[in-house]
Image (spheres, grey):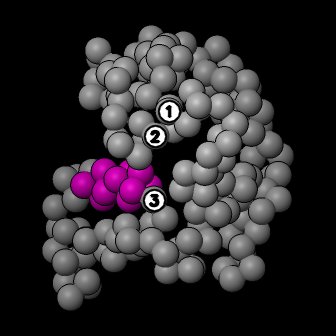
């Protein structure tokens, strides 16, 4: 067993795959977009879900579709109000421990992902990028809003 960045691996192939993440090597590039993966099965899953739009699980309440049964089940729990993880600082609730931990990073000042337009902070770069796309769409649709945001942020 060998430890890398706090993670333990019982088998060498698992360590080797994990090390690709640290080295930012992705030997399985998607032929349809700029994404790359460390494992072929993850690439195959990406192609099936994103490019072939294979999403057989459909929410009967809102129509949202899902590729995997586990994400579908989590979604259905949201409709039931199932949110077992609560922030003791701001009372925000979450359906998954992963989202709760990312949220707590905001309170612990351990994130460096801050929007340059509105100064809102995010626990991970993906959330910041999604926020930026939304802000850009708003700024594109409402050009005057950029002036308002620009003056408020100063």
Q: Secondary structure at mark 1?
A: helix
The residue shown at (59%, 67%) is 103
Query: Residue shown at 80%/43% (left/top)?
Result: 77
In percent of width and height, residue 44 lies at 48, 14
**Circle 1 is placed at which residue position?**
16
Which region shows up in magenta?
125-136
Question: Which numbered dot is residue 32?
Answer: none
Residue tagged 3: 124
Q: Which mark is residue 19?
A: 2
Q: What is the secondary structure assignment of the residue under circle 2?
A: helix
Kindly indicate the quadrant of the structure image that contains residue 54. top right
Question: What is the secondary structure assignment of the residue under circle 3?
Answer: loop
The picture places residue 23, in percent across and down from the top left corner, at 35, 43
Kindly report the distance in space between the C-alpha atoms of the residues bearing marks 1 and 2. 5 Å
Q: Main secondary structure of the magenta part?
A: helix
In x, y percent, where is residue 146?
Answer: 19, 68
Is the residue marked by circle 1 packed among few (<14), some (14-19), or many (20+) residues within 10 Å? few
- Other residues around mark 2 within 10 Å, as few (<14) / some (14–19) / many (≥20): some
Sequence order check, earlier mark of 3 and 2: 2
How far apart marks 3 and 2 lie (CA) works out to 20 Å
């Amino acid at each position: 067993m060998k430890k890398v960045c706090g993670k333990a691996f019982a088998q060498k192939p698992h360590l080797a795959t994990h090390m690709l993440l640290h080295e930012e090597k992705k030997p399985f590039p998607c032929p349809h977009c700029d994404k790359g993966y460390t494992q072929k099965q993850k690439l195959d899953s990406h192609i099936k879900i994103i490019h072939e739009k294979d999403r057989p699980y459909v929410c009967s309440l809102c129509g949202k579709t899902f590729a995997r049964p586990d994400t579908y089940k989590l979604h259905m729990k949201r409709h039931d109000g199932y949110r077992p993880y609560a922030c003791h600082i701001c009372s925000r609730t979450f359906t998954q421990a992963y989202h709760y931990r990312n949220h707590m990073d905001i309170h612990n000042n351990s994130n460096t992902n801050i929007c340059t337009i509105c100064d809102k902070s995010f626990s991970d770069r993906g959330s910041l990028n999604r926020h930026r796309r939304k802000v850009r769409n708003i700024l594109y649709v409402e050009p005057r809003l950029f002036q308002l945001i620009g003056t408020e942020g100063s």
